[in-house]
Amino acid sequence: MRLREPSRLLSLFLAVAGGLVLWSAFPDAGVWPAAFVAVAVLYWALGRDNAWWNLLIGFLFGVSFFLPHLWWAHESTETAPWIALSALEALFIGGFGVLWTWVRRARFLRRRGWRLAAAFAVLFVAVEQWRAEIPFGGFPWGRLAWTMAGTPTGRAAWLGGTVAVSLLVAFAGALLALAVAGLVRAVRTARAARVSPAEQPARVAGNRTVTVRSSVGRSVGALALGVAVAVVPLVLPLPTSANAGPVETPEGQQVYDAGSDLAEDGQLWAGAVQGNVGEPGLGAFANRAEVLNNHLEGTYVLAEDFAGELDVVLWPENGSDLDPQTAPDVARGLDAASTAVGAPILVGAQEFPETGGRYNVSLLWQAGQGVIGRYAKQHPAPFGEYIPLRSILRLFSDQVDRVTTDMIPGVNPPYVDVPSRLGQDAYRLGTIICFEVAYDEIIRDAVQEGAQVLVIPTNNASFGFTAESTQQLAMSRLQAITTGRAAVQISTVGVSGVITPDGTVVRDTELFTADQFVVDLPLRSSITPAVAAGYWPGWIVGGLAFALVVAGVVGGIGARRRARG
């Protein structure tokens, strides 16, 4: 059940259209079924048996997707870096096109519909995984899994993380392509039979009738299997709350319950402050004191109704760009706010060690004590927080010099311990700073180290009114499902959100508004299959993809020898 090899013009059209369809599956458009359609279109577009041509087709598909998907990179820098990042990521899709050309030459895949679909899915997800790891630590933006937050397919994250979700989407999309192939074949055969029925021998007409029925049957089977693949995660036993949502306290205050009935180790009451900035975009942090003061003011608003009732107050990444450990006035401001609210504050700041460079840190600040917990970002964003190959890249764009001090990676585990206000054991927060939410291994490490809840401080101010923050929120939702942990994404400017362990958003904020809220977070210690599996899903997919490529190359060589002999 194969599609007829498309013309070059048609495959070019499909590549561009497919990339745009995939873009529509992600926030802010969020038409998640489009992800399946996009995979099907890519499968069709790569139908020609020419590796160089499929390199071009895959690249065009990738460029058509990544340019609009990463538009926020243009907002935060300039045109050249945005195009360069999009082109680099698109090259991986082009490479996939080459590998797929080879893989389908394997003898055991020839004219085997569901096997072809499975091989296509495995190879696509392997390339997606490699793209998340290389170069410079990878860039996982644009993974198929991120489209599936809040969908039946997305629930598979609990079982196998983002690898499992992407694998199901790619498999179902390829099956959709095969279903279309069968229908197209049936329609063409039926039309041929109607052209001149009087001139056809009865045997030919009968064979065509059988072919039509067979093609339709295979199409229905492929479509049914694709639907089953997409919805089968509904049977997985995700922790689902009956209490989640806004709750009014006896005093009339509103608290957002993130699944208190799912708590295994008690509950944590956290305040969260989205302080906002006066100027969206590149000039957002021109006045550092303004950003700090906005978050201090938000903390005082929380103190008016919840003083002494919170375990911690969560600030975003760069809530204070000034280091309170070296700036006495900032330290005094944090002391006063922490005293007023009666809880330590998790502050996003920058540290500048004497040895050079800078750290992006989350500091747990307690009034009168200062820093009582610290996490330094392990995975600084290349080209955003540090510049690899600076001297070479400066030849192409002076934007590299906007990052004046390269960020250096932290080496401490991704968590912070919060003392219990009730005198019980400390609560462990998994602290995942900004883009780190896209890197599965950091999330897993946090939970394996005992994190009971996830906190994602982020700074989205320089991205303006783009979809960057909502794309990130979708990632936070998938990671909540993967780990079985409630999560809070707290941003300087939005979108901030409160997420239950099954990925449901019970509170979110608007972009570029000042806001604050209180959340009741369930503390959980159970380990999901995805966390227990660790790196194995990615390793298995990568190993299978390598085996498929070898089998395809061997099959292609054998076919050429038989053709010559």
Image (tube, helix red, strand yellow):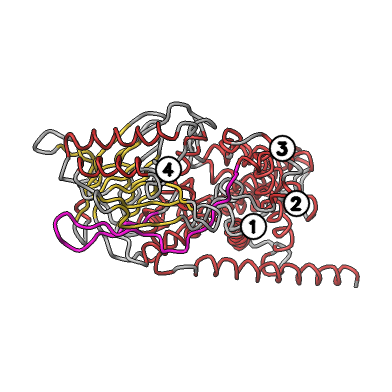
In the rendered structure, find residue 55 and report the number of the disc placed on it: 2
Q: Would you say residue 415 sits in the magenta stretch?
A: yes
Task: Quote the CA–CA distance across marks 3 and 4.
Answer: 51 Å
Task: Quote the CA–CA distance across marks 3 and 1.
Answer: 30 Å
Q: Quadrant of the N terminus?
A: bottom right
> 532 or 220: which is nearer to us?
532
> 87 or 331: which is nearer to us?
331
* Mark 2 surroundings within 10 Å by alpha-carbon count, few (fewer than 14), some (14 through 19), many (20 or more): many
Mark closest to the chain's N terminus, 4 or 1: 1
Place of residue 225 in the rendered image (x, y in percent of width and height, measured from the top left) = 50, 55
Q: Residue furthest front?
A: 328
Place of residue 245 in the rendered image (x, y in percent of width and height, measured from the top left) = 24, 41
Residue at the spot of label 4: 322
In the rendered structure, find residue 466 and report the number of the disc placed on it: none
* Mark 1 surroundings within 10 Å by alpha-carbon count, few (fewer than 14), some (14 through 19), many (20 or more): few
In the rendered structure, find residue 135 and report the number of the disc placed on it: 1
Task: Quote the CA–CA distance across marks 4 and 1.
Answer: 31 Å
Task: Quote the CA–CA distance across marks 2 and 3.
Answer: 15 Å
Hey, which quadrant is residue 479 in on the image?
A: bottom left
Classify mark 1: helix, strand or loop: loop
Q: Which residue: 44% across, 56% down?
A: 376
In the rendered structure, find residue 13 and report the number of the disc placed on it: 3
Amino acid type at mark 4: Leu
Amino acid type at mark 2: Leu
